[in-house]
Image (cartoon, grey):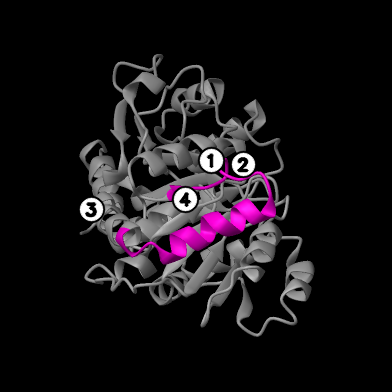
Amino acid sequence: MNARKALLIRTDASTTIGTGHVMRCLALAEGWQNFGGNVCFVLATASPLLELRMKREGFDVTHITAEPGSVNDAVATSRIAHLNNIGWIVVDGYQFGGDYQKIIKDYGHFLLVLDDFGHADHYYADIVLNQNIYSDISLYPKHESFTLFLLGTKYVLLRKEFLLWTEYKRIIPDVARKVLVTLGGSDPNNATGIIIEALKCINLNGLEVVIVVGGLNSHSALLQKMVTDYPNFSIRTNVENMPELIVWADIAISAGGTTCWELAFLGLPTILYPIAENQLINSAFLNRAGIAWNIKNNYHSENDLVIAISKCLKSYEGRTRMSEICQKTVDGKGTQRVINTILDNSNFKVKK
């Protein structure tokens, strides 16, 4: 590894954390690699399939045994960076608070923090990146004078397989019949099962449903059993062709995490069914901006959920307007903008 041109990325994935933090860090890692740099991922949790993907793409993977977000974690991460002469450390996860950031900085490293809602009591980072539509400087009342903030959807991180579709133009059908269901990498409470049961009740000729099940989802066998007698329903696991599935679909049913930005980039009208507390604010703002329909709080029974989904499938005007807003919101240049900011604030340059 050419250490002077390397990033160290500290993040985790698990059944409780999900995979969103790792997947958006992969986007940053791919962008950095494309600029001629190297990337080392440091993980405190085991995610074999994700690690296999990291290694296949040419990234180093190192494990630490410290409690995620602890002092020992910060020290171990800093020492790995120091031993490899790595200048920039990137952290992504709600466990990396102010004390953690301070240790990283005290070791003399540059620090970029990916953040969603201002969870730390103080920000010691050189750069704070919040790619969400609701991001605002008011989320960060305590920070260092030198801290730079990259806020908003112009900084959305997209993996390289999505950027191949930059010129894609979506055609909106009168009625949406191809439904993509994607509720995150783990979905611990099996919200996917709730959506499947609702879709079974929709009476629409030609309805096709593809359900993406993440590698950390413990309900895969149950979900497969649920669709056994429904030939128009199919389960896809460990998907690596997500852009193709999004292009195939007429509409998506998604949780309120990072996948929303992938769907928006490809102009896919989306129904939101947030599955975690930290997705609620994002879902509310996406609904308000016209980027997605948030239906989670608009039903009190399975029949109400069926009605809400059916209405979205049949709303040509609503889906057309939503698709246009989506593609204006996410332009696919976010990763490049973030990397440019890192380079502009570094004492080294990677080969462009």
What is the C-alpha distance between the residues marked 3 and 2?
Answer: 27 Å
Magenta span includes 300: yes
Sequence-wise, which precedes: disc 4 or disc 3? 4
Q: Residues within 10 Å of mark 2 (few under 14, many from 20)?
A: some
Disc 1 on helix, strand or loop? helix
Q: Quadrant of residue 64?
A: top right
Q: Magenta: predominant secondary structure element?
A: helix
Q: Which residue is mark 4?
A: 258
Q: Are marks 2 and 1 in contact (CB under 8 Å)?
A: yes
What is the C-alpha distance between the residues marked 4 and 2?
Answer: 12 Å
What is the C-alpha distance between the residues marked 1 and 3?
Answer: 22 Å
Q: Which residues are magenta?
A: 293-317
Q: Which residue is mark 3?
A: 328
Q: Which residue is mark 1?
A: 279
Check disc 3 and give the amino acid type. Lys
Q: Is residue 172 above or below residue 351?
A: below
Q: Which residue is mark 2?
A: 276
Q: Nearer the viewer, residue 193 or 107?
A: 193
Q: Residues within 10 Å of mark 4 (few under 14, many from 20)?
A: many
Magenta span includes 302: yes
- Which residue is at 58% across, 73% downward? 203
Q: Nearer the viewer, residue 230 or 333?
A: 230
Residue projecting furthest to the bottom: 231
Check disc 2 and give the amino acid type. Ala
Mark 1 or 4: the one toward you: 1
Mark 4 or 2: the one toward you: 2
Check disc 4 and give the amino acid type. Thr
What is the C-alpha distance between the residues marked 4 and 3?
Answer: 17 Å
Disc 2 on helix, strand or loop? loop
